[in-house]
Amino acid sequence: MNKKKILILGSTGSIGKSTLNVLGNYKNKIEILCLSTNKNFRKLHKQSKLFNVKNLIINDPDHFFKAKKFFKLKKIKLFPNVSEFLKKNKKKIDLTIIGISGLEGLEPTLKLIPLSKNLASANKESIICGWKFIKKKLLKYNTNFIPIDSEHFSIWSLLNSDKDKISKIYLTASGGPFLNSSFNKLKKIKINDVLKHPNWSMGKKISTDSATMMNKVFEVMEASKIFNLDKSKIKIIIHPKSLIHAIVVFNNGLIKILMYDTSMEIPIFNIVFKNEKINFYKKTELKFEKLNGTNFIRPNNKKFPYIDILKKYKIKGTFFEVILVTINDELVKLFLNKKISFIKMQDLLLKTLNKRVFSKYYDKYPTRINDIYRMINKVKIYLSENE
């Protein structure tokens, strides 16, 4: 039996580590062609030894230079970016997994599509800001796209060929660590409080986005693009237990609900081994006591003011998404570096988003990838000059 050839970008991050946790149980069925990290080359080395991976990408220039000394006597090929790896490797990839975050993921995603039979991505920012470029390449090279995020994976799993019959989709949100906190308490929030997600183990950036509900704003945009739906058909509903990941209401009266434990290993397993007769390595049992009292709450826009941003999201694929993503990225960095408070971060984002310097671009479209990167720089410069 031919082994499934897999490439993982961001293997030292949360999605990458979850992927390798799954694949470690099925080594006889897979071959990992390449792993990548931004800086954590020592962790990357451990992963390469465990899976016998001969190609490694270290994106950060300083850490790539350090890694060259570290790997000097090891039989491993090092590359500073995806482009250099692709110059030496032309093998068709059965599955490419994009586990990196941020808009830095857009360019490597586009470069890997031509060699990938299937592309699975958890890179919200690239999907939100560059979907039209991604979709164009997916169609050109007949590459199958699979979303990794639990909500979008769940929708994708439920739809099959019924996309035209959708009445409404509900994206579930846990409500984060402050669901039951008063507004006054939010003024005193510390970074450690933000990072204590009640259900999921995630990185600092996504944990912050979960606490503000920005991740759900992004997910509505993401779903509207991936599934080609009007945003009016996509709703956010808070489900504190995080057992149900998506609800799809169809025009024929049927409602489909997908439920599984709060582990990214479950969607990843089903992406890697779709249509194969292989059992998930962890025994899954339906625990009815977990279902008892499964409650749903409509989000409070006063507590989660970012949800109102969706009212501005009128035309898909404009510079609005690029500007929003970049402002959020930069302000989250300031918050995590203790430069601004949790409340100040939200206040600044909403005010900056309304500035005329940016709102004049909300009906204009990027026509090339470089247009996106120029706008990112414009936003960063503005924020650095107006801190």
Image (spheres, rainbow, N blue to C red):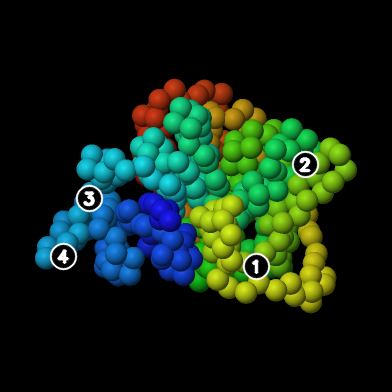
| Residue under numbered circle 2 | 168
- Which of the 4 quarters of the picture holds residue 29? bottom left
Cα–Cα gap, marks 4 and 1: 40 Å
Under mark 4, the amino acid is: Lys
**Label 1 Cα crowd, 10 Å radius (few <14 / some 14-19 / many 20+):** some
- For the point 41% across and 53% down, which residue is it? 2
Q: Which of the image's four quarters has the N terminus?
A: bottom left
Mark 4 or mark 1: which comes first in sequence? 4
Cα–Cα gap, marks 4 and 3: 14 Å
Under mark 2, the amino acid is: Lys
Under mark 3, the amino acid is: Phe
**Label 3 Cα crowd, 10 Å radius (few <14 / some 14-19 / many 20+):** some
- For the point 32% across and 54% down, which residue is it? 34
Cα–Cα gap, marks 4 and 2: 54 Å
**Label 4 Cα crowd, 10 Å radius (few <14 / some 14-19 / many 20+):** few
| Residue under numbered circle 1 | 261
Cα–Cα gap, marks 1 and 2: 24 Å
Instruction: Name the foreground residue: 298 vs 227.
Output: 227
Secondary element under disc 2, as helix, strand or loop, is: strand
Residue 285, above or below 156? below
| Residue under numbered circle 4 | 74
Q: Position of residue 178 (x, y in %)?
A: 65, 66
Secondary element under disc 4, as helix, strand or loop, is: loop
| Residue under numbered circle 3 | 79
Cα–Cα gap, marks 3 and 1: 37 Å
Mark 4 or mark 2: which comes first in sequence? 4
